[in-house]
Image (tube, helix red, strand yellow):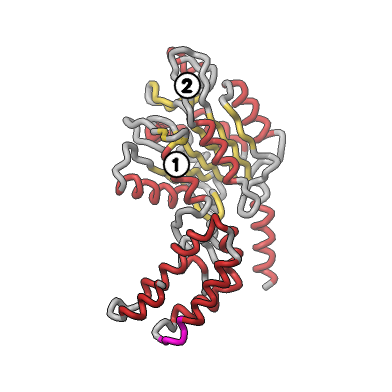
Amino acid sequence: KKKKKKELQNIKVFLMNNYLLSIGCDSYESKEIDNLQGAENDANNIYNTLLEEKYTIYNVTQSKYLKSPTLSDFRETLEQMLYDNETPDIFTLFFAGHGGIVDGTYYLVLNNSKLDRLSISAISLSEILNILCSSGVKHINLIMDSCQTAGLVNDLLSVIKPEILGKKGSISIAILAAAASDEYATEENGEGIFTSSLIKYINGSKKITTDLEYLDLSLLGKKISDEFLEERKTQTPSSWSLNIYGFSLFSKNLYFNGNDSIGLHDFSYIPRISILGEVLEPYKKDLWKHYENLEETSNLSKLLYLLQNIFDNIDDENKVVFIKGVAYRFIEKIDSNLTMKKLELIN
């Protein structure tokens, strides 16, 4: 028990030393570069979501959001975050904006970048990786919502060296890219479709697993890629991981239920750490009890009373979510041959 308590304390300390840098670049000085409409929204949404008080793993004070930064803005912020504070255990960089490949190198195009001289006016992923690796960061998360992002795989060669990767305690890197090297990253309604999907998995609107306390980019990448393929989206997200060991964290998994085997997630896509989840928490054992005994006719009236009681305690915004997530599950449980019983339950 003492050992377990110490491990939990270490985890809490560990989680306090993680930094997020979220960058969105809509505005560009060069007339040759089209301005965007959703990059800043994406970066702001990622920043606010990952720093949500209830489930963040990031140090709120040390994390930053940059809106259409210049190259010097980016460099100064990166230097300040990595060297003017305690070196972070996890550093997560999110970028939304223009990006592209020149001579096999992937560049993040910033506010004052020029297309005919990206090598000096933009910043390459190789340079970013080298800066992060030399800073002492233990784990790097990179999320890129820009065009041709899968082309950044070439830049990984800059850090695949024996002195950087492979040894015990060496750095680990996880990358999530929005599009293939020959694809564009699409915006809809002022948001990138890739970032919009990612946020839904972070905030619990979509569920991946209930078994893991934390989500990582490999897991998220596979899920989003499968989703885009199934829905025949015009871009193909992908992910890579290098030398992942020990902690590989990106965000908390809102559906993780610890040692509590009777979980709300088994009913629905309702995270335990949510307004609706908190309302349902005291009722979950009774809900399961009724669910397992639906064949008993007398149970239906008891269930009705319970559902009405819960319904009265839920705000209007969550009433439909509750019906879809919980009540429908009970209807599906009833044998299709028990027509009258099923109709009674629906009523």
Tags 1 and 2 in contact by the CB under 8 Å rule? no
**Residue 233 in the image, given as x and y percentages of width and height:** 32, 40
Q: Amino acid at mark 1?
A: Leu
Q: Is residue 329 magenta?
A: no
Viewer can see residue 170: yes
Residue found at x 64% / y 36%: 64
Mark 2, residue position: 35
Question: In the drawing, what numbered circle is on residue 304?
Answer: none
Which element type, helix, strand or loop, lies under badge 1? strand
Image quarter (top left, top right, bottom left or bottom right) of the C terminus: bottom left
Residue 103, position in %: x, y? Answer: 38, 21
Q: In the figure, 40 relative to 287: above or below?
A: above
Where does the image place residue 321, in percent across and percent down from the top left?
48, 59
Label 1 vs 2, first from the N-terminus: 2
On the question of residue 273 being in view, the answer is no
Residue 184's place in the image compared with 237, above or below, is: above
Describe residue 116's horizontal placement relative to residue 14 as left or right: left
* Residue 116 x %, y %: 43, 12
Q: Residue at x 52, y 47 (%)?
A: 167
CA gap, disc 1 and disc 2: 24 Å
Q: Vertical placement of 34 versus 157: above or below?
A: above
The residue where tag 1 is placed is 176
Secondary structure beneath disc 2? loop
Task: Say which of 148 and 281 sits in front.
Answer: 281
Instruction: Identify which residue, 228 or 13, lies in the foreground.
Output: 228
Q: Which residues are magenta?
A: 296-300
Q: Residues within 10 Å of mark 2 (few under 14, many from 20)?
A: some
Marks 1 and 2: which is nearer the front?
Answer: 2
Looking at the picture, tell me which residue is in the foreground, 279 or 9.
279
Q: Amino acid at mark 2?
A: Asn
Viewport quadrant of the N terminus: bottom right
